[in-house]
Amino acid sequence: MQKPATAKEIVHSLQDRFRPEKAEPGYAAIFHLDIEGERGGQFTVAIDDGTISVHEGLEGTATCEIKASDSTYEDVEWGRTNPQMAFMFGKVKVSDIGAMLDFAGMFHRCEDFYKD
């Protein structure tokens, strides 16, 4: 499996890295990711009762909106930047931190999932 390099590829890899057993039964949420820069884009990640879908564009009413630059998103996903520090310094903006923490816990980290 090829390692995703760009923010766009990393977002699409969420489908492979999803851990449905970490989602509570009946859990449903929509996340809008607005990743600025030429390696990013706008994405909708929908989780519904153990299934996930990732689409380009913003669809539906978001439970949580996440905004970051492409380089910041890539660095957070690959473990080169601490996500809490990126949030505290305003490099990542999140509309609902509780929902974001739930979201983060449902995925394998890139650095662990794509070990050589």
Image (spheres, rainbow, N blue to C red):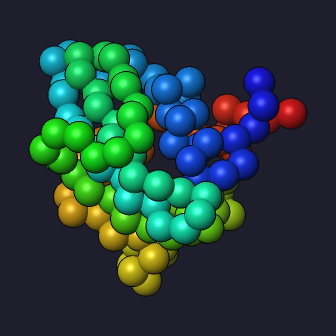
In this view, 30 is above or below 87: above
Residue 22 % position (x, y): 37, 25
Nearer to me, 7 or 87: 7
Quadrant location of the C terminus in the rendered image: top right
Residue 34 % position (x, y): 38, 59
Residue placed furthest toward the right:
116
Q: Residue at x 78, y 31 (%)?
A: 2
Q: Is residue 22 visible?
A: no
The total number of labels drawn is 0
In this view, 94 is above or below 115: below
Residue 76 % position (x, y): 57, 60
Nearer to me, 107 or 52: 52
In this view, 74 is above or below 88: above
Q: Residue at x 23, y 40 (%)?
A: 59
Q: Is residue 86 visible?
A: yes
Q: Quadrant of residue 56?
A: top left
Residue 15 % position (x, y): 49, 26
Q: Residue at x 56, y 24 (%)?
A: 16
Q: Is residue 77 left or right of residue 91?
A: right
